[in-house]
Image: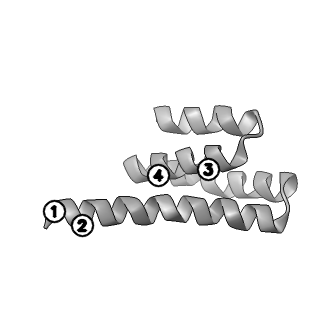
C-alpha cells in the first residue's frame, strides 16, 4: 500500500505520468489497488487530454509487461 500512497501523492501534485507508473507498480504488488483505478481514470480524463491519458496508460502497461517478462525470465 506504500506504493499506492506514493502514487496518490504524486497525482495530487499533478505528476500524472510518474504517479501512474508508481500506481502500476503498486498493482503488481497487490491487486486490491485496482479498486482505485476507475476513479483515477476519471480524474485523468478530467485533468489531461485524451492523448495524455493514452500515453500515461501506455507507460503503465509497459511497467506491467516489464514485470511479467522479468518474472518469466527468473522463473525459468
Q: Say few, some or many: other residues with alpha carbon within 10 Å of mark 4 (under 14 / 14 to 19 / 20 or more).
A: many
Give the alpha-carbon distance from disc 4 to disc 2, as whole Å: 18 Å
Percent position (x, y) of residue 6?
A: 57, 33
Task: Name which of mark 2 and mark 3 comes first in the sequence.
Answer: 3
Q: Say few, some or many: other residues with alpha carbon within 10 Å of mark 1 (under 14 / 14 to 19 / 20 or more).
A: few
Q: Say few, some or many: other residues with alpha carbon within 10 Å of mark 3 (under 14 / 14 to 19 / 20 or more).
A: many
Q: Which residue is mark 2?
A: 72
Provide the secondary structure element on which disc 1 rests: helix
Q: Quadrant of residue 55?
A: bottom right
Of marks 1 and 4, the one in the foreground: 1
Percent position (x, y) of residue 5?
A: 56, 33
The answer to whether residue 18 is above or below residue 62 is above
Of marks 4 and 2, the one in the foreground: 2
Q: Identify which residue is drawn at 51% across, 64% down.
A: 62
Q: Which residue is mark 1?
A: 75
Q: Which residue is mark 3?
A: 20
Q: Which residue is mark 4?
A: 27
Number of callouts in the render? 4
Amino acid at each position: 500500500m506504500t506504493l499506492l500512497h506514493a502514487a496518490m501523492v504524486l497525482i495530487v501534485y499533478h505528476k500524472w505520468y510518474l504517479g501512474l507508473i508508481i500506481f502500476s507498480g503498486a498493482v503488481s504488488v497487490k491487486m486490491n489497488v485496482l479498486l482505485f483505478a476507475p476513479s483515477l481514470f476519471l480524474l485523468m480524463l478530467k485533468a489531461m487530454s485524451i492523448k495524455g491519458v493514452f500515453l500515461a496508460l501506455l507507460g503503465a502497461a509497459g511497467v506491467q509487461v516489464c514485470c511479467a517478462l522479468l518474472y518469466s525470465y527468473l522463473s525459468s
